Amino acid sequence: MSEKSGSVSRSDSENMSPELVKADEALEYLSYSASIPKAREEIDDARLNISNQDALLDDPKNRIFGIFDGVGSAPRSEEASRIASDTIRSLLENIPSDCTLKQAVDIVRQSIIIANKAVCDISSSTTATVAYIWKGPEGERKLIIGNVGDSRAYVMRDNRLTQITIDDSSLRDPDDSKARVIQDKISELEQPEKEADLLLRALFNQRNVISSALGFKETISPKVWDVSLWPNDRVFLCSDGISDNLTKLEIQNILAHTPNSDDAIGRLLIASLQRSKSSHPRSKPDDMTCISIKTQVGADEKAAEIDKTVGSIADAETFDQLYNLLTTNWDTLEFKKVDELETVLAAIDRVRKNELGFEYITRTNGLRNKVMELMERKI
């Protein structure tokens, strides 16, 4: 990442396009967001937006989105996250339609700086991850991401999840490229007690300690990136209640295998909440908030999502239909208790890549036979 220019270079992010991409004029933004407090005991209504220290900014009409996570140790942290969200929304919703990309990047940066002053005025603190989708004069789109703290922004393209932001960790390497490598390792770490790299183990244990947030200091320098946005990309923003409990691969698998963004948000929240109450090394009780912004051309993709709906595993004619069925009906398919959705989906992916044999897929409900059938048909 190149923080000074606010752009993603070819060498730093191979799966993100380094070019400015023209999108169809009919490009739409479908956003789904939800938040649950760490105190919630029931998960049946996990997608309800309930007040907590996290705040959401979800304004698809003006192409403005954001996650704000009030710092738990600070007084009035819930108020801080709300003030930051309201301040930034009021500034970004008035961005001129004819502004240049550079002007838009500067406005996003300034909005975070102004929000910092507002949060300082109440002697509190909050993280801030802000997304604004800029439209160019010829229909090109750029996703502008501004960030302070450890709330994250990702882009999913071709079922591959790329993190755009870099956490402001208390032990972060000053070299962004090195910090990103370390961050990716921590994001996948599931057994830190077995990690031979003592520094990585220490960083994992301190991953929730941040070095910067709105309200920490009167003067801040927000990091800002801009990323080319393509039709069918999915932008995912979340607080650390999601990214600390789930690995990056787990987040990617849920997003990739749940075409409907509303269902994906629900599954991510439930998986994070269940993990937070377990004995897993990544377990961390916390508020959990996320936004999924899906780009699509007209209504074609929505129609495709509806067409993917099937009633049973035997009816699935494509892997997309199979994945959609498993993720949306897992609890009613009566799999064995030892089977877990994410494990089953990961096994199917590895079998499709010839990394595992068919015996690693459960026979329950004829799943193994269905995977064999679809692979033989090369679907």
Image: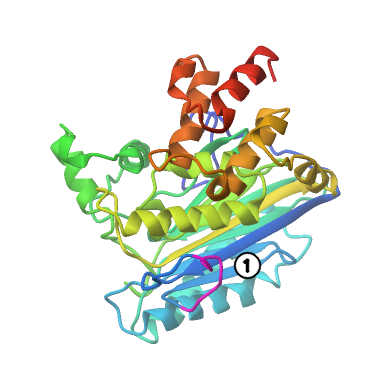
For the point 43% across and 76% down, which residue is it?
Answer: 52
Query: Is 130 located above or below residue 344 in the figure?
Result: below
Q: Main secondary structure of the magenta part?
A: loop
Query: Is 326 located above or below residue 298 in the figure?
Result: above
For the point 52% across and 47% down, which residue is it?
Answer: 154
Secondary structure of the residue carrying tag 1 is strand
Query: Where residue 301 appears, x then y in whole percent?
Result: 79, 44
Query: Where residue 311 appears, x then y in whole percent?
Result: 71, 42
For the point 27% across and 53% down, which residue is it?
Answer: 207
Q: How many marks?
A: 1
Q: Which quadrant of the view contains residue 69?
A: bottom left
| Rendering colour mode | rainbow
Which region is colored magenta? 44-51
Residue projecting furthest to the bottom: 122
Q: Nearer the viewer, residue 32 or 231?
A: 32
Q: Which quadrant of the view contains residue 39?
A: bottom left
Query: Where residue 195 appears, x then y in whole percent?
Result: 18, 35
In the image, residue 93 lies in the stretch drawn in magenta: no
Q: Nearer the viewer, residue 181 or 177?
A: 181
* Residue on which the image places disc 1: 58
Query: Where residue 58 appears, x then y in whole percent?
Result: 63, 67
Query: What is the quadrant of the C terminus in the image?
Result: top right
For the point 32% across and 72% down, which residue is it?
Answer: 216
Report whether residue 12 is seen: no
